[in-house]
Amino acid sequence: MSGQAPEPVAVLETPIHVDYSFTAGLAQSRFLKGLAEGRFLGQRCPRCKKVYVPPRGSCPTDGVPTTDEVELGNTGTVTTYCVVNVPFQGQAIEIPYICAQILLDGANLAFMGLIQEVPADQVRMGMRVEAVWVAPDELGPTMSSVKYFRPNGEPDADYETFAEYL
Amino acid sequence: MGDTGAEEVLRAPHALDYTYTRSVGPVIGAFLTGLRQGRILGATGAGGVVTVPPTEYDPQTGERSGELVEVGPAGVVSTWAWTDHPSADQPLDRPFAWALVTLDGATTGLLHVVDAGSSDAMSSGMRVRAKFVPEADRRGHLRDIECFVPEASS
């Protein structure tokens, strides 16, 4: 040490690093390969007829394998959403932005997606949206193939049509 | 889908990285500052107990800890576990022992590693000595102590 007293230690960085090897399984692999083709692929329960997207390979209600593949369309309904106002490390999008639960038409399970091309304060439950995909040469087996969802201009869906999925 | 046997299942690496920045407070702060200076500090408590690493409050009585005192840099291994295959983030890249080291002047064990070469060289009760990283590389961190080494070979 030199003669000058060093600054006392006030903070400590504790990095956490965890390496996973993620195996998607058959059903999710089908879904991811669908994304690489710009398509939403789900699966229908043979018993209760519900369509799950993303599929998990079995019906959580009936406990049976979901073997029927179903292609969903590009449009859906915002069932619920939140406005992200808090910045955090690694944030890729300018705040405020919208994370929404989106129920694709014909699906019985909502999944999370971004809503863009609309001011945050104009997003609402029941809003009709459509998927915006990345350029064809950028498609891959990842949710990043969907850039975001945007309003498609249709009138809002009635609450009763998505109340079950909140 | 029917014949799913031939279906390719996708797999991908998924790395999770996040870094906490913790405020260390006055006592651990002093301990880490000491490490940067090549000194190991403990906290004095009731009944002559010296806790290493130091705590702000006496673990036995809950009273505020007393003054910090220098301990070590050598001490006694109270218990240990050998690691034959160190993983990437562990302190040493060769087989080593995790050990609780009761430093001279301390009454509690400090968890660290002993670079003994072989588990045959390890025993409870053996004396070890702290080996600090070069001063220029110290950053106020427990890893400013690179490892402990058997005292006879240090």
Image: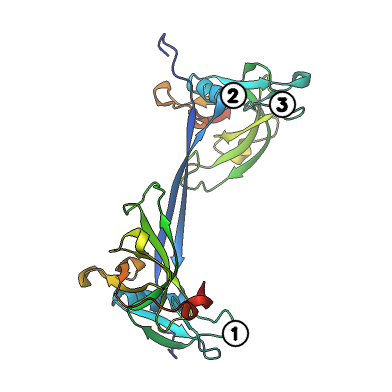
Compared with B154, A102 (above or below) is below
Task: Provide the residue designation for mark 1.
Answer: A62
How many residues crowd around disc 1 within 10 Å: few (fewer than 14), some, or many (20 or more)?
few
Task: Provide the residue designation for mark 2.
Answer: B27
Residue name at image x 62 percent, y 28 percent: B53
Q: Could you say which quadrant of the image residue A31 lies in?
A: bottom left
Residue situated in front as seen by the camera: A121 or A59: A121
Label 3 sits on a secondary structure element that is: loop
Residue name at image x 29 percent, y 75 percent: A153
The disc, 3 or 2, on the residue closer to the chain's N-terminal end is 2
Q: Are marks 3 and 2 on the same chain?
A: yes
Residue situated in front as seen by the camera: A23 or A148: A148
Residue B62 in percent (x, y) is at 74, 28
Mark 3, chain letter? B
Residue A46 in percent (x, y) is at 52, 91
Task: Provide the residue designation for mark 3.
Answer: B58
Q: Is residue A138 left or right of residue A96?
A: left
Mark 2, chain letter? B
Residue A146 in percent (x, y) is at 31, 69
